[in-house]
Amino acid sequence: MTDLNGRRALVTGAASGIGAACARALAGAGAHVLVADLNGDAVRDLASEIGGEAWEVDLGDTAKLATQVLDIDILVNNAGVQHVRPIEEFEPDKFSAILRLMLESPFLLIRAALPGMYARGFGRIVNISSVHGLRASPYKSAYVAAKHGLEGLSKVAALEGGAHGVTSNCIDPGYVRTPLVEKQIADQARAHGIPESEVLPKVMLTESAIKRLVEPSEVASLLLWMVGQDAGMVTGASYTMDGGWSAR
């Protein structure tokens, strides 16, 4: 079992889905968890449930994050959104907003956390990326671009942090059973010209050898190992949990 007693962790996008599962897993292993999300009511409820702290924050407001200082041992960059459009119809402001939330804010949070991690000689950065950080899909230009960028950022943090006891890795799930996935079913159906009932078998799971969604708890279980002492030599890596999608 991973023992995180005495460790402080921050999880972004923690109001539901993967973020909430990760926050619960970290707290269950003994960490004091700061749960961050734009949905203040949800993070306050979760913080109360797990004995952590709530941080109601708009991570798209990168100007405020630029002056942030974080006293944490574990950083989980998870916050994300999805927007499904062909490139020629993709709204430029939506593209910029997605990159701010999913690439710039992880950079700024890593930047804010590293000095304290370096001073203590220990740090774990886990970036919840996606199979779309390794592969592309139509109609997701901003999401794919942001996740590919996050993979590169994670590797740079690994190279810089290695001498200071700080590791940085990505978890790359396929489609996870979360509100983010459920909300895009209608958009996918419209973009592909198919009924919503056909989106899972014909779009989301067509490349996967295992024909089901990933559960948030499965992602959280891998995260727990990554942040523990046994993973001290694991850095600059991208661990897929995609049912075989990226094996193609």
Image (cartoon, rainbow, N blue to C red):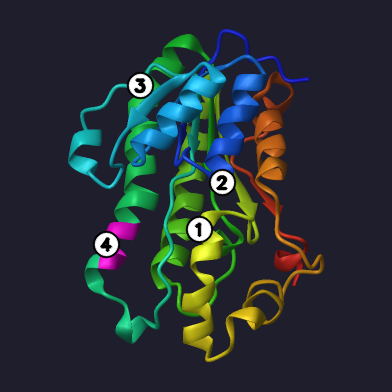
Tag 3 secondary structure: loop
* Mark sitting on residue 180: 1
Q: Quadrant of residue 132?
A: bottom right
Distance from Cα at disc 2 to Cα at disc 4: 24 Å
Quadrant of the image for the C terminus? bottom right
| Above/below status of 136 relative to 35 | below
Distance from Cα at disc 3 to Cα at disc 2: 24 Å
Tag 4 secondary structure: helix
Do the numbered discs 1 and 2 sit on residues whose CB atoms are within 8 Å?
yes
Q: Residues within 10 Å of mark 4 (few under 14, many from 20)?
A: few
Distance from Cα at disc 1 to Cα at disc 2: 8 Å
Frontmost of labels 1 and 3 is 1
Distance from Cα at disc 3 to Cα at disc 4: 25 Å
Of the image marks 1 and 2, the number of the one nearer the N terminus:
2
Magenta stretch?
Answer: 94-98
Q: According to the image, label 2 marks what residue?
A: 17
Q: According to the image, label 4 marks what residue?
A: 96
**Tag 3: amino acid:** Leu
The residue under the point 67% across, 25% down is 232
Q: Is residue 102 visible?
A: yes
Q: Quadrant of residue 135?
A: bottom right
In the rendered image, the residue lying farthest to the bottom is 193
Magenta run includes residue 86? no
In the rendered image, the residue lying farthest to the left is 63
Q: Is residue 9 visible?
A: no
| Above/below status of 214 relative to 160 | below
